[in-house]
Amino acid sequence: MTGVAGVRERWRMSVHARALVIVTATVLAFGLAVLYSASALLAVREAHGSMYYLLRQLSGIGIGVVLFAVTAKMDAERWRKWAWPILGVGILLLVIPVLPFTTAIAPRINGSRRWVNLGFAFQSSEFAKLAVVVWTAMLIVKKGDALRRLTKGLLPFLLVLAVLNLLVVLEPDLSMAMTFTLIMGVVLFAGGVRIGHVVVLSVLAIPLLWHEVEKVQYALLRMTSFLDPGRAPAEAGYQLKQSLIAVGSGGLFGVGFGQGRQQMGFVPFPYNDFIASNIGEEWGFLGILFITLAFALYGWLGFRIAKEARTPFQQLTAIGITFTTVSTAFLHIGVVIGLLPTTGLTLPFISYGRTNLVLSILMTGILVNIGSTRERVVGDRATNPLTASTP
């Protein structure tokens, strides 16, 4: 806001940013329908009303929309100044669930401690994804050409990544460790890191990673069921088998909204980890194609916004946010149709889970601001585009 009477400043969304808002709103609306169908019967069996999960998801959308409105109208360059505090908070939230004396606020649910309850429950690793994106982008810009050196360039990133991965493995949540690694790797690649360093370190890390996977029984069973379904225990491949039955029975057009059978209890958590199987069953191949194309369009728009970003930090942040959302969606769909091992990753904007939902909408708001320009408005109509200043 300026001091001149009748003059004010505002953010004007680009065509790509406006299209991103439309795509996100469309996926959210479609997701509410899918979630209701996938959760209604289960909610009744749990002695709740049929709209129990839908109403909770709507509350998450309400919070997300408020945060979206704030982040879309706030200069995205501010996140660069907040990178270290955000990372610190992210690590703190990951530490809480693994401490032995914090079970009162971080109870074990379904065999793992991933949630922190401070009056409202949230999954700390979801916030950490945003921290990884913002902090990695900030440090890449700060290091500049030094990024291409191993010790002073790449090593600090690897140390932070090791801390984050160790904390989520202790929960345990190997899927999130993989997610952190992929996010940081992609942002580093976009920032100009030497590929040779990454390849050598990756090769050296493979034996260590496999050793850790062998310690986690559920992860080993999931890998076995994917690589050798015939020798895997029946319970290990049960979710995937039922998911494939659901998707296969949907055919081209699906069995119809609300007519699917998998939500009757055949697929555990049909409203969360395997919600795309409900899409395949009730909406058919066309439903899976629609959601795949929607996230592909989200990705294209996000990368276009990154290309036209105002600063290098915002460009890397846009790349990180876009990759985080789209890769999670494609990994989820790949698991549901049997192309990838079971990972436990949710489908952004669609799966039940308010933490992921709120953070996904918030990050989209950041992306929209990166795709906007600051302009000066004189009177009611006349405008004079003003390039946003860099702090």
Image (cartoon, grey):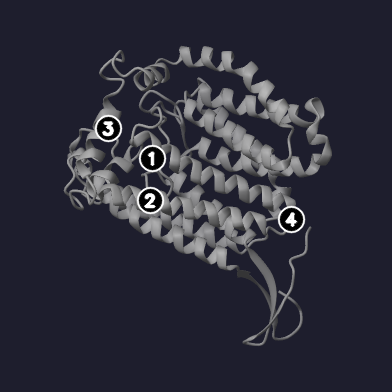
- Could you classify mark 2 by the number of other residues whose Cα lies within 10 Å: few (under 14), some (14-19), or many (20 or more)? many
The label on residue 252 is none
Residue type (three-letter) at the residue carrying disc 4: Thr
Q: Label 4 vs label 3: CA separation? A: 45 Å
Who comes first in sequence, dot 4 or dot 1?
Answer: 4
Which residue lies under the disc numbered 4? 311
Q: Nearer the viewer, mark 3 or mark 2?
A: 2
Who comes first in sequence, dot 1 or dot 2?
Answer: 2
- Could you classify mark 1 by the number of other residues whose Cα lies within 10 Å: few (under 14), some (14-19), or many (20 or more)? many
Q: Label 2 vs label 4: CA separation? A: 31 Å
User: Do residues under tags 3 and 2 come within 8 Å of each other at their CB atoms?
Assistant: no
Who comes first in sequence, dot 1 or dot 3?
Answer: 3
Q: Residue at x 63, y 24 (%)?
A: 162
Q: Nearer the viewer, mark 4 or mark 1?
A: 1
Q: Nearer the viewer, mark 1 or mark 3?
A: 1
Q: Nearer the viewer, residue 58 or 372?
A: 372
Assign the C terminus to one quadrant of the image. bottom right
Residue type (three-letter) at the residue carrying disc 3: Pro
Figure quadrant of residue 310 = bottom right
Q: Residue at x 51, y 60 (%)?
A: 20
